[in-house]
Every structure is written in structure tokens, then in C-alpha cells.
Amino acid sequence: YFGAFSGALFEEPADFIMIDSEDNTTIDRVMDLSHWTPDYINRHFTLRKDVNLKDMYNFLLKLVDVKKKNKDQYYVETPILNIDGKPLYAWAPTFILIDSIAAVKSGVGIEDAERDKAGELKEVEISGNIDAMREAKLNTDFIMKMKPLCNQYGIYLSLINHITQEQKMSMFDIPKRYLVALKPGEKLRGGFELIYQAYGIDRLTMKEKLDMRNPIYGEDIDGFIAEYMYIKSK
């Protein structure tokens, strides 16, 4: 669980935990993008494949417990001085990325499914409006429970989400604008509550691909030009 934790010295970058709920990332891809060495990956990075929101919550609670029980290791001296010229202490930062909150489920699995008299699984509807509302509420509850713990123990939780267009039910149903930078009818998957629980919301839009066919900055550059918009701050 905690192979990413090192001595958490401030001379080295913070530890990073990625929860890949969409199962799209491998350690090799992380190394290609970051240019981190295998030794650095082993000491500072953890890749998990959790989909169940309950598993994520329990993992974060164990993470907090590790920091609390090892305060002498994780509550470290910083280079910043206070007004008396003495160094300030802070929790060594841990960055957690969930990719994505839209792929996270509330914990209803096959063990919760109903069976008929013969012991066979009954057919169930995979998803619907009621299920979506339940997932959105549980996502919000998850954020509300984690906020005070993250604030207290130096844990920085980032969620990748997806902006979608709300379907109009009738010509008289005018979509609302929830934030200035969002268009009327645009919403975040996982529920509008996430907008108001978030400390900040950024929008990243892929624009132009860079490769040998489009060598704007030279043939050695391979990637994308992206548009970045800061939608909301706390």
C-alpha cells in the first residue's frame, strides 16, 4: 500500500499516488512521461487500480493513520522561517490523483446482487437516473469527509472529471449556467455538488497534435498543444 513513501525529506519531490479507475495507465507510461528512474518510482510513486469508492476512502484513512503514527518521519522541517527566524514544520506533502471521478462507483458489486431460488443472479439494470443521483451524492460525501483530513495532514487530492452537456427535456427548459466559464447546460459528471466542494476547477482542452507531420517546434517534439482555463478558485 505505501511503497511510495520515503523519508519524505523536503530536498526531494513529494510522494505521488495515482488511482487509475479507468485502467488506462501503466508504470511504463508514467516513466515515459516523467523520465523518473525505476528507483525513484519505487520510492515516490504508487499506481492503484481502485474503482470502488469505499476502497479509496479506506485507503486514504490508512494513509492518514500512517502519517499520524509516524509523525517524527512525516512532520518535517521546511526551509521557511517564522517571524522569530525559526524553521516552520509541516506535513510532508502527498499528492493523490483520481482518474477519473466519473469512473468511480459506490461499492455495489456482485456480492450485493440478488439471487433467485435456484441461486442464479437476477438481472439488474446497469445504470439509470436514480443510480446516477446516488453516485453523485456518494461522490460529494466522499469529498466532504476527506477535506478536513487532507487539510490537516498535507494530502492534496486532485480529481479528473468530464464536462458534459445536459440534455434539454423541452423547449421551455432553459439550461442554467453554474459557473461563469461553463456554458449554459454544461455540467460535471458526478453531480453539481462537486463544483461547490472543489477548491479549484481547471479546464484542459486538447487542441493540436505535434508530430513529424506537424513539426511546429521541431521534429523532436511529440505531443499536443492544449488550452488551459482556470474556472474556479476557492
Image: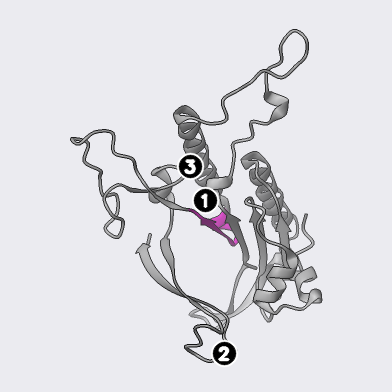
Q: Residues within 10 Å of mark 3 (few under 14, many from 20)?
A: many
Label 1 to label 3: alpha-carbon separation: 11 Å
Q: Secondary structure at mark 3?
A: helix
Q: Residues within 10 Å of mark 2 (few under 14, many from 20)?
A: few
Q: Residue furthest bottom?
A: 218
Label 1 to label 2: alpha-carbon separation: 44 Å
Q: Where is 205 relative to 199, above or below?
A: below
Indicate yes or no whether the magenta region holds residue 34: no
- The amino acid at mark 1 is Lys
Q: Secondary structure at mark 2?
A: loop
- Mark 1 or 2, which is nearer the eye? 2
* x 65%, y 55%: residue: 20
- The amino acid at mark 3 is Thr
Q: Where is 167 relative to 84, above or below?
A: above
Label 2 to label 3: alpha-carbon separation: 45 Å
Q: Where is 152 relative to 194, above or below?
A: below
Q: Which residue is mark 3?
A: 140
Q: Which residue is mark 2?
A: 219
Q: Decide which of tag 1 and tag 3 comes sooner along the chain.
A: 3
Rendering coords of residue 94 (x, y %)? 64, 64
Write the start and end of the magenta stretch as one range: 150-161
* x 68%, y 42%: residue: 55
Q: Which residue is mark 1?
A: 147
Rendering coords of residue 35 (x, y %)? 69, 79
Indicate yes or no whether the magenta region holds residue 159: yes
